[in-house]
Amino acid sequence: MPTFTAGTPPPAEIAVEVALVRRLLEEQHPNLKSLPLSRAAEGWDNVTFRLGNELAVRVPRRSGAARLVVNEQRWLPRIAGALSLPIPTPTHVGVPSPLFPWHWSVLPWIAGTSGLDTPLEAGEAPRLGRFLRELHAIDPMNGAPQNPHRGVPLGSRQAVTGARLERLLETVGHGSDLDGLAELLAVGSAIPIDVPRVWLHGDLHAKNVVSADGRLTGVIDWGDICTGDPATDLASVWNLFEPPAHARFWEAYGEVSEATRKRAAVWAATFGLMLWDSHHRADPAFAELGVRSLERVAATG
């Protein structure tokens, strides 16, 4: 299995280039093969290409992401109609072939930039709250996926999260405002889940929302879609907005228990530490967002 250094993405198991994607389109969706095709972005799991003006092609770069594409293909069409924001529901499905061993998708292109590049305005917090209320209200359905890392009891993640916090404190120095997070993680990780399982995006942070001049125009990258504790998604308010905007988010989402809100703060710290620990070498801006999320949790959690 390929290894990688903490703070950098894992290496691609297959080099996904324009020429390969063009051949896949010719093989499986020849009606699209003549559209302009260009590389748009590469993440930990997938490479995204712009296809013409209206479409994108999303292709996994490693085997661990292949099953996530299948989850998107199966479940996004079933939930999209209940949501008030666009999501990239596949328009064409790619299947394994001699050219490429995994599923891949053609999706609508959602215009804008990532929320990391163009942060959302504070006034968008209620739109995110309403979107999550809609998502979490959808019937989980028979066969809905579960994820061993998302929506689960926080105690199962405490050891990894604590180690990440210690590595961060070794970097920024003990005695910082982040020292108090250790107690929050210890106490919050013991809070039981007090609500039914709901649909989750599972990885809702600034790179997975689309921003047009600070307006929220879409939610992308649903590879971690699953069912579980809604606190996992509610954590996104600390990643995407400064504390003065949080009250309007919660008002738009609706009533939650104090236990759920506390778990959401712990999930926000969990994600913040993950962003810093996984990206500080290769993507400093993303890692810094993780630290800012932690500072917001320390101030309000």
Image: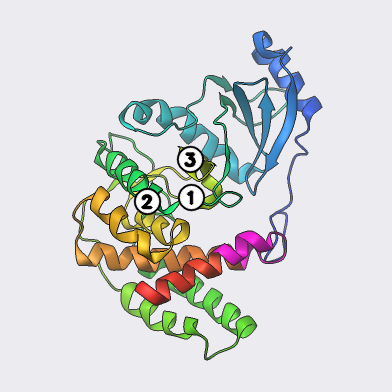
Q: Main secondary structure of the magenta part?
A: helix
| Magenta segment | 277-289
Q: Is residue 223 left or right of residue 57?
A: left
Among all residues in the image, which is located at the extreme right?
19
> Is-magenta flag for residue 285?
yes
Q: Amino acid at mark 1?
A: Leu
Q: Position of residue 32 (x, y in %)?
A: 66, 13
Q: Which residue is mark 1?
A: 120
- Image-quadrant location for residue 154: bottom left
Q: Does dot 1 land on a helix, a strand or a loop?
A: loop
Q: Is residue 71 left or right of residue 255?
A: right
Q: Quadrant of the C terminus?
A: bottom left
- Image-quadrant location for residue 261: bottom left
User: Which residue does the image show at 43% across and 72% down from the upper left?
Assistant: 158
Q: Which residue is mark 3?
A: 222
Q: Does dot 2 land on a helix, a strand or a loop?
A: helix
Q: Does dot 3 land on a helix, a strand or a loop?
A: loop
Give the number of the disc on residue 139: none
User: Mark 3 vs mark 2: which is more N-terminal?
Assistant: 2
Q: Is residue 131 left or right of residue 13?
A: left
Q: Could you tell me if the residues under marks 2 and 1 are in contact, i.e. CB atoms within 8 Å?
A: yes
Q: Does residue 230 show up? A: no
Q: Amino acid at mark 2?
A: Ala
Q: Which residue is mark 2?
A: 125
Please tell me whether mark 1 or mark 3 is closer to you in this view. Answer: 1
Q: Position of residue 11 (x, y in %)?
A: 74, 51
Density class for disc 2 (Cα within 10 Å; few <14, some 14-19, many ≥20) is: many
Q: Label 2, label 1: how many angstroms apart (C-alpha)?
A: 8 Å
Q: Is residue 124 left or right of residue 261?
A: right
User: Which residue does the image show at 59% across and 42% down from the upper left?
Assistant: 65
Q: Label 3, label 2: how many angstroms apart (C-alpha)?
A: 20 Å
Density class for disc 1 (Cα within 10 Å; few <14, some 14-19, many ≥20) is: many
